[in-house]
Image (cartoon, rainbow, N blue to C red):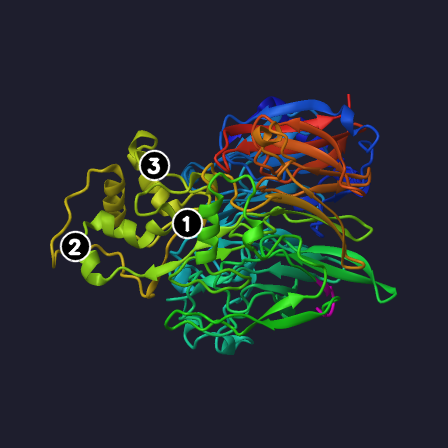
């Protein structure tokens, strides 16, 4: 921990006014604004008439450069957030002055994309609940010190409720937990291959760190939904995941927790999990006190495309059938919005089960239908034709030929030939999630990037036996993302491993194999010898290839017959998306009627705009914030801009260049009678420069 003792005296004064500030709507007290996850603020000091006057009020430099996806919370004048390496800090929200900072030396390399923290108070003292690596921490909100009575000296294991078979498997948390009384419900990120841990939903006691309840998303034989999987899937030997990593929403008055889940693992071949696969790719409604299932809706049956539900659902009220209905809306990577009655789970717009193609792979059985909502229409395109190839591409003929040779269409199973996935692996909708205002208008940003996917036969035992131990491990565990040439996909967040020894110390590389980093999972089950062999191969100094019959390392031969051939964007010869714009969009949807209100491109490539090309939009990560001042704030774009739009029309009212890309959802709050808007600026995604700051804006 790194205390700032001169500032600590300020914390009790800040926390003393926290309850009053929350009641007046001046705080941003929870992830994405509140338990509804609606990204909405009642503040209106900054509004459509004066937003053009915004200036930088303060900038906090953490000194820790790299991608930051944190949506900071603000409680009674104190701002709590995280750095690029998951160091947790508190700032004076009026000035940006650091009050305290926490890191655990036991977890210095165990960090992921940390999207924020959770604040809990019993009225006498406050706690910050946060995660680093596979641990849930409880910190004193005044000092940043670990609370000894929580878990094991201040931290509890995120593996605690996942069963004996998963205790050594890789589990982290990307998104803050959700509170109900003394219970904290934790999202978890697990592996996406056959050694993935199960993604059970766990409730922790916020005072003690002990387990409250566990809901099994991969049912046991005595659980509902067991019959929708292969017989032994629940044993977690060949199948895992079905986790909630995106975060949850809660109706505290009714005591209902809303949980979006992701796909089962392995991602792209489901021969070991034949069936509908409940409760993967579902929106679950659970009794918050007990974990009992109240209702569920599955958005994809037997997912073979990694179409996780990517963001927390949003709680809102809509006018439907002549009356007001408490509803829950769920955005998706495919561009659909599913809208349900919050209590009964009944869809407010009809959902049709439509037939889609079967799989061409041996041992695989695609589910014959998929759910498609009648309204709203998708907020991202889902089909591509020849007419959709970019008019700005210099190699348009080659792109046309590539498109015509590939299989296309929504829910087209991957095979050995190229398949165009559109929207791509990163959506459509992404983890930033939508904003919703009290009128029932939903605002959602989307990526419009097509990706190319295919599978091939897994390596044969005879071929693996010819390789050195390190190369063999790389082939089994790393080649899917980093490629056979180790070039990675830097624009997609997968770094090149070529020449890694010049950028990373050997000890750090060894640790990263275990802990993972950002998109990369940790390989916790590999032995020390395996890790040393793998690192030796990457650093270019391992032993020569073994001959036939040579001793093998302990890494297992894949038990699935196919290997994913990697993540490949469909781009032109200059690296721009191969399809026609928009390449990123922002859409307003009236959920009372299911109709779109407006849709605009989000972001631009300045060099194209300078040539007279209208703004094309860019890929974007991070969500919007809506305010009572009539504004919609969003950063998120590759061009590194922070923008404010008129939420009624989509008209651009203000924009400013950030010191680095703001791939995070902003927060807005009031301190001392002044409204601020703050956003994390870490860059480093989409192959953009790194930053280390949080920047707050206010009126002069």
Q: Nearer the viewer, residue 134 or 656?
A: 656
Residue depicted at x 39% and y 64%? 165
Main SS, magenta residues:
loop
Does the image show residue 537? Answer: yes
The x, y position of residue 249, in whole percent, is: 67, 55
Residue at 63% x, 69% y: name it: 296
Against 608, residue 148 (above or below) is below
State the CA–CA distance, disc 2 to disc 3. Answer: 29 Å
The residue mark sitting in front, 2 or 3, is: 2
Residue position marked by numbered label 3 in the rendering: 508
Tell me which label, 2 or 3, sits earlier in the chain: 2
Residue 342 lies in the magenta stretch: yes
Element at label 1: loop
User: Which residue matches tag 2?
Assistant: 466
Q: Earlier in the sequence, mark 3 or mark 1?
A: 3
Which region shows up in magenta? 339-346
Relative image position of residue 318 (x, y in whole percent): 81, 59
Name the outermost residue toward the right: 322
Q: Earlier in the sequence, mark 1 or mark 2?
A: 2
Secondary structure found at label 3: helix
Placement of the C terminus among the 4 image quadrants: top right
Tell me if mark 1 has few (under 14), some (14-19) or many (20+) residues whose alpha carbon lies within 10 angstroms of its own: many
- The span from disc 1 to disc 2 (Cα, nearest Å) is 27 Å
Name the foreground residue: 139 vs 690.
690
Cα gap from disc 3 to disc 1, whole angstroms? 15 Å
Q: Residue at x 58, y 33 (%)?
A: 605
Q: Tell me: 108 left or right of 559.
A: right
Q: Quadrant of residue 682?
A: top right
């Amino acid at each position: 921990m790194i205390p700032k003792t001169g500032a600590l005296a300020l914390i009790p004064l800040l926390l003393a006014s926290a309850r009053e500030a929350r009641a007046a709507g001046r705080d941003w007290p929870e992830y994405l604004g509140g338990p509804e996850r609606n990204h909405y603020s009642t503040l209106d000091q900054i509004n459509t008439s004066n937003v053009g006057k915004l200036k930088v009020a303060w900038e906090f430099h953490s000194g820790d450069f790299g991608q930051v996806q944190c949506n900071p919370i603000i409680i009674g004048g104190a701002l709590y957030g995280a750095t690029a390496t998951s160091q947790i800090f508190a700032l004076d929200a009026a000035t940006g002055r650091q009050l305290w900072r926490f890191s655990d030396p036991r977890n210095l390399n165990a960090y992921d994309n940390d999207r924020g923290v959770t604040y809990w108070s019993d009225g006498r003292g406050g706690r910050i609940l946060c995660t680093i690596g596979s641990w849930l921490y409880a910190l004193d909100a005044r000092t940043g010190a670990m609370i000894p009575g929580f878990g094991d000296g201040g931290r509890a294991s995120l593996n605690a409720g996942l069963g004996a078979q998963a205790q050594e498997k890789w589990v982290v948390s990307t998104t803050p937990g959700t509170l109900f009384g003394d219970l904290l419900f934790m999202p978890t990120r697990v592996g996406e291959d056959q050694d993935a841990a199960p993604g059970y939903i766990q409730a922790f006691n916020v005072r003690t760190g002990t387990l409250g309840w566990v809901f099994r998303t991969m049912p046991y034989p005595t659980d509902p939904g067991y019959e929708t999987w292969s017989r032994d899937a629940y044993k977690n030997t060949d199948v895992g995941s079905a986790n909630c990593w995106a975060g949850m929403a809660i109706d505290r008055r009714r005591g209902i927790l809303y949980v979006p889940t992701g796909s089962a693992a392995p991602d792209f071949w489901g021969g070991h999990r034949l069936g509908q696969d409940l409760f993967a790719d579902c929106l679950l409604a659970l009794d918050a006190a007990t974990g009992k299932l109240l209702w569920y809706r599955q958005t994809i049956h037997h997912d073979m495309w990694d179409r996780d539900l990517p963001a927390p659902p949003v709680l809102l009220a809509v006018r439907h059938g002549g009356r007001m209905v408490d509803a829950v809306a769920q955005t998706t990577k495919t561009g659909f919005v599913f809208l349900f009655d919050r209590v009964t789970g009944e869809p407010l717009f009809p959902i049709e089960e439509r037939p889609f193609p079967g799989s061409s792979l041996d041992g695989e059985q695609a589910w014959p239908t998929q759910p498609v909502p009648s309204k709203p229409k998708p907020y991202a395109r889902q089909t591509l034709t020849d007419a959709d190839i970019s008019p700005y591409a210099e190699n348009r003929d080659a792109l046309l030929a590539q498109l015509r040779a590939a299989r296309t269409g929504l829910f087209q199973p991957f095979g050995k030939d190229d398949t165009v996935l559109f929207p791509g692996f990163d959506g459509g909708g992404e983890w930033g999630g939508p904003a919703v205002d009290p009128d029932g208008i939903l605002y959602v940003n989307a990526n419009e990037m097509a990706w190319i996917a295919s599978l091939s036969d897994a390596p044969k035992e005879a071929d693996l036996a010819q390789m050195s131990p390190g190369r063999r491990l790389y082939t089994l565990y790393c080649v899917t993302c980093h490629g056979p040439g180790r070039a990675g996909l830097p624009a997609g967040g997968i770094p090149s491993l070529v020449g890694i020894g010049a950028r990373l110390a050997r000890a750090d590389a060894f640790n990263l194999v275990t802990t993972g980093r950002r998109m990369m999972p940790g390989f916790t089950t590999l032995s020390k010898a395996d890790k040393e062999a793998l690192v030796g191969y990457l650093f270019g100094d391992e032993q020569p290839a073994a001959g036939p019959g040579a001793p093998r390392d302990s890494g297992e031969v894949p038990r699935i017959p196919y290997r994913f051939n990697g993540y490949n964007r469909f781009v032109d010869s200059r690296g721009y998306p191969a399809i026609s714009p928009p390449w990123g969009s922002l859409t307003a949807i009236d959920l009372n009627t299911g109709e779109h209100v407006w849709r605009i491109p989000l972001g631009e490539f300045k060099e194209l705009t300078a040539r007279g090309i209208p703004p094309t939009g860019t890929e974007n990560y991070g969500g919007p914030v809506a305010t009572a001042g009539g504004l919609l704030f969003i950063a998120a774009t590759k061009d590194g801009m922070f923008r404010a739009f008129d939420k009624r029309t989509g008209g651009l009212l203000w924009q400013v260049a950030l010191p680095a890309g703001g791939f995070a959802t902003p927060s807005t709050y009031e301190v001392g009678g002044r409204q601020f808007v703050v956003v994390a600026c870490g860059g480093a995604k989409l192959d953009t420069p790194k930053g280390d700051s949080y920047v707050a804006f206010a009126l002069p």
